[in-house]
Image (cartoon, rainbow, N blue to C red):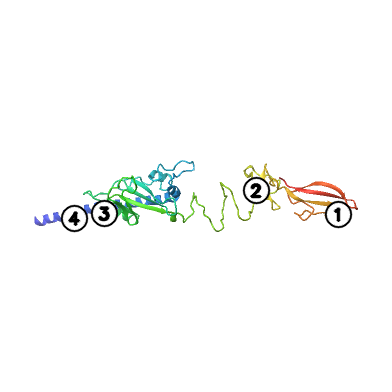
Amino acid sequence: MLELAIALALASMVLIWTANRLVHQADDAAGRATGVWLLELKRGLDRMLERHFDSLAEGTPALGEDGLPLYGDLFAPRLSELKAQGHLPAGFPETGAFGQDVVIRVLRDGRCPGEACRIDVLAYTSQPLLAADGLPDMMRLGAAVEATHGYGGWAVESRIRGANFDFPNPPAAGAPAVAPGTLAVWTGYGASDYDLYVRRHDVRDPELEASLTVGGSISAQGDLSAGGYLSVGTAATAGSTCSAALAGLFARGADGGLLQCRGGRWKAPPGAGFGGAYAVAGADGCGAYSSVNPITGKCSCPKGYTPVRVSSDLWGPDGLRTNAYVCVGAG
């Protein structure tokens, strides 16, 4: 009987230990899953900071192309808004493995806007992780924080801190205090980090110091200023047709001059239709008594220009008739 009692006791101990181990494994797995969930949220917040840093620094709403705000409160964005803007996958869970949703607080430094401006973001679970005794569950908290790769932490009575951050609790004036044992993840950008790259929707002048090559069209909403020469590569023939889509645009003529698409045809710009002048003296052709066009070096007009006779007179004792012409463009 004694041996049986000992065997039963040992079996009970093994069962209890195994059950306890399974519970701890389940809690550990849920903790790691929550940490991975917070880490992915942190990456989404990184993308939000990259896109809206200027608005956050200025304290102004982030607007869409329709001029409407993209967030109900840019300093307290919701997961649904982050997903709508593409910062998080559409299927990103609204709650973590422990069934908790998340609160997001964007913290704007008092030096914003300016070179020393800094924007930090804390995202933390709505409820703390507590053990059976009502104190923070260090096992589950530790597993979750480990999975955040240094970006996670938890709240204590007066601070919210982790390996790479330490903020007061509550994190912002007027915000409610965060309960001890609440999981948190942090990300942040300073103006120096933000200024490293040129980004889409960037409002700064990048001041590039080298050439810029673009494969497509360039559209400017303001003036275009060039400190050097302006080269037009596309060629057109004066008087030839052009489509309505090209109306007002310029091309290079056969003589190197500018042509503009006006009235469905390529024409010299208004005031630019003069192609020189020349005079031909009778049977002399373009000889010693004739005057060549300084533009062509001949008694002719540039290609695309039409000679218009402006005078015809007898000249000199030989009675040669001299015809004078002006070259008129298609403008």
- Residue nearer the viewer, 114 or 63: 114
Q: Earlier in the sequence, mark 2 or mark 3?
A: 3
Q: Are marks 3 and 4 in contact (CB under 8 Å)?
A: no
Number of disc labels: 4
- In the picture, the disc for residue 284 is 1
Q: Nearer the viewer, mark 3 or mark 1?
A: 1
Residue 242 in percent (x, y) is at: 66, 44
Q: Give the Cα distance between marks 2 and 1.
A: 40 Å
- Residue at horizontal 83%, vertical 49%? 323
Q: Residues within 10 Å of mark 1 (few under 14, many from 20)?
A: few
Residue 215 position in % (x across, y down): 56, 53
Image-based side of 311 in relation to 9, left or right: right
Mark closest to the chain's N terminus, 3 or 1: 3
For marks 2 and 3, give the CA distance.
Answer: 72 Å
Q: CA distance from mark 1 to mark 4?
A: 125 Å
Q: Amino acid at mark 1?
A: Asp
Question: Which residue is painted at 11% across and 54% down in the image?
Answer: 5
Q: Which residue is mark 4?
A: 14
Which amino acid type corresponds to the residue marked 3 in the rendered image?
A: Met
